[in-house]
Image (cartoon, rainbow, N blue to C red):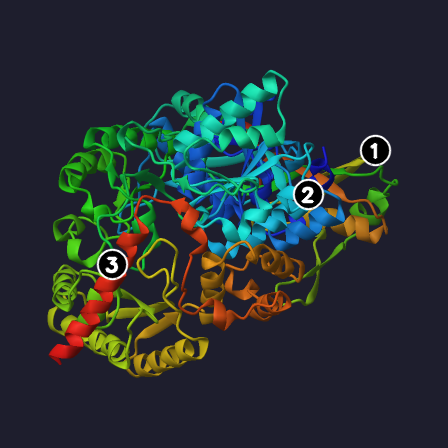
Amino acid sequence: MVIVKFEKVNMREFIPHLDIMRVFNMAFRRSGLKVNYSEGFNPHALFFFCQPLPLGVASRAEYFCVSTSETAEDVKNKLNENLPKGIKILKTKTVDGDPNFAANCGRADYVVEFDEVLPYFDLKNTILKKDEFLLTRIDKTGQRKTKNVRNSIFKLSQNENKLKMQLGYGNENLRADAMSKQILTNSATHSMVKLITKIKTYDKNGVDFDKKYFS
Amino acid sequence: MSFEKIKHLLLTVDKPARYIGGEFNAPKVKNNADCKFLMCFPDVYDVALSNLGIKILYHLLNEKKNVSCEFAFSPWFDMEKLMRENGVELYSLESKTPAKQFDIIGFSLQYELSYTNVLFMLDLANIPFRASERGEEFPLVIGGGPCAVNPHPISDFFDLFLIGDGEEVLPKLCDEYTKLKNNGTYRKSDFLKIVAGIEGVFVTSLNQESVKKAQVKDLDKTYFPTKVILPNLEVVHNRAVLEVFRGCAKGCRFCQAGFICRPMRFRKVDTLIDLASRVMSDIGYDEISLSSLSTCDYPHLKELLEKLKPIADEKKVNIALPSTRVDSFESEFIDGARKSSLTFAVEAGTQRLRDVIQKNITEENILLSCKKAFESGYSGVKLYFMIGLPTETEEDVKEIISLTKKIKWTYKQYATNKKSLRLTVSSSVFVPKPFTPFQREGQMHLEEVMKTQNYLKFELRKLGVKYSYHDAKSSQIEAILCRSGREMSNVIEDAYRSGCYFDAWTDKFHYDKWIEALKKNGLDPNELTRELKGELPWNNISVGVSQEFLENEREKAYKLREEQSESI
């Protein structure tokens, strides 16, 4: 098994998760790296991804595990020769078993950039010091649904026209795009989100995946 | 760059990956190229990038030092809206350069119902529709592909057409352009006069008396790309494609491709193996399709498969054989493949009608192939028929039902699979096409087509067979568009202006608007789909088969009808 950290930037954030899996599948084929396949009628390459990113969210901290006997070094170098611009392997490491990233992830850091200069949001008093933060969204059937997501908000800060947030990722998932929109709605701000980039992934206790799995 | 204006709004459209470029294997854009070529396909990304032709020419042009070729496709309705609202013109996928800034814009014309999308793309690019309205400041607009064999209906919109194979003519055209441009003497009209002398080039403003199609002589030595651009999204045909040969050995009398792609030209087994191995390692698909009009007619198919299979197996790549006809069913080959469904293009219900159209398969063939397939585990069969073929009678339609019954019976007898039989019958509508023996035939009346479709729907439902059919109305418009002359340009423009585009998408097709556009120009759809008498609009084009030969073939078809009715 080899675990992989990669980034998905430079407009590749518009490529859906399924197609990203296809990108890796094909990159492995092109690079000649051998991957183990599942048994059965419809064998597929054994990749174990983390919670999928929403479409449009870029990331500098994505992880997956692949069942292969190739060296970590080879996986990194050869894959990088075979990936489209914007998708890049940052780190690889050989491990004994699948660490199950999907089950272990708990939080993520995001940087949200806006198209205009933002007003000052009093994030501390309006959100962090409160027990409740209501997120309203329209579900697939067109109904408005409101939910308290305060437990999935860990950190929030503003730096001029950027927001930095640490949100639940995985089981108690809170989407950064939905969160940003809600903050804008609540403050009646008309600016728009330009780019959301996920910059770190943590486990449920807030330990950085890099530290937990790659050191 | 205007694309930047909408980048952060891309999430508001469906499948934004269609519009961002950056595909793997896309060659680097040469900013200082002498000739900047924009390869356009008048449909959405997913359809466009399933087409092999544009990918061959795209990579071929990009291998030339002084040429840079980029892609542009039709944006979907939501993206169109976004672009118009933000003043973003049609741009190239790779460098996001506005279409207007290219030297040559080439459209691939694969089906007549995409003609309005050519106008749609010119509209989005802010380029005037008519060649006569485009001055020196606008790019040349050229067309090619199978529809170009009768370029007249759309010739007002184009400066020139390439008729036939593009691999040799298109680079020549770019070279001529570069030459004139570099010595500072480029003028559109001069350029057009010069290239009118190249075989396969039809210049619309000169309306040459006779144009011969361009033809690649030695396919084996003809360029074929192996590092093929890889779509960002799953597209219609998501697999590597290898063109085994060009042309078709069968002379099915309704089939345009069979006549306009003659003669047959093959790639050698060793060439194909070499290409296939490179395609597999350069692209990384898990399926490779051996493509042609009838791959089972490749004379060395067995040798090719025997050599290819171990290479493909090692890379866990499936080999797909499309366009497999009944009479060449390779039972030994399918043994190793996944056993799902079998497709037969039967076309007509009776042997008589199959003889008329020269579809050389018999009921015996079909049932024997089914028997073999069922015995080896297949549980699905798809049957394709065509409604309204010349000389068709009620009997021919009824026989579709009885053949279906026989297949059901065969399954009962020989099936080894415990699943129940999945039988699907599909019918299209016969469209008389230029350069076929049936080019002059009338098309069956709308009402009659629908009557037949209803009959089949009713009868097949009783048998529990799934039936799907192609819309009669769009087939009528297709027949009109493919056989008309220059007068059709006005109709196409009127149709587009009244809201017709993406006509090939069933739910976007507006029959009433097309009829209105025809009426406005004093044309009657029933008149236009009648038997054609006298001079044919495409008489100045030659695709290699003579009009005498085609008339002869038509006579032969009719003789068969008479002989057989005598014997009854």
Alpha carbon distance from label 1 to label 3 = 78 Å
Residue B302 location, quadrant: top left
Indicate the secondary structure of the residue bearing disc 2. Answer: helix
User: Disc 2 and disc 1: Cα gap in Å?
Assistant: 51 Å
Residue positioned 81% across, 35% down in the render: A161
The residue sitting at 17% across, 34% down in the picture is: B307
Task: Please give the residue where the numbered disc 3 appears in the rendered image.
Answer: B553
A45 to A71, vertically: above or below: below
Question: Label 2 is found on which chain of the structure?
Answer: B
State the residue position of label 1: A160
Q: CA distance from mark 2 to mark 3?
A: 42 Å
**Do callouts 2 and 1 mark residues in contact (Cβ within 8 Å)?**
no
Q: Quadrant of the C terminus of chain B?
A: bottom left
Q: Is residue A91 left or right of residue B443?
A: right
Where residue A204 appears, x then y in whole percent?
58, 42
- Circle 3 Cα neighbour tier, 10 Å, few/some/many (<14 / 14–19 / ≥20): many
Asked whether the residues under marks 2 and 1 belong to the same chain, the reply is no
Q: Are marks 2 and 3 on the same chain?
A: yes
For mark 2, does the 10 Å Cα neighbourhood hold few (<14), some (14 to 19), or many (20 or more) residues?
A: few
Q: Amino acid at mark 2?
A: Glu
Q: In the rendered view of the protein, which quadrant contains the N terminus of chain B?
A: top right
- The residue at which mark 2 appears reads as B133
Label 2 vs 3, first from the N-terminus: 2
Nearer to us of marks 2 and 1 is 2
Chain under label 3? B
Question: Mark 1 against mark 3, which lies toward the viewer?
Answer: 3
Q: Please tell me whether mark 3 sits on a helix, a strand or a loop.
A: helix
Instruction: For mark 1, name the chain.
Output: A
Q: Amino acid at mark 1?
A: Glu
The one nearer the camera, B444 or A171, is: B444
> Does residue A77 appear left or right of residue B514 in this picture?
left
Q: Quick one: SS at disc 1? A: loop
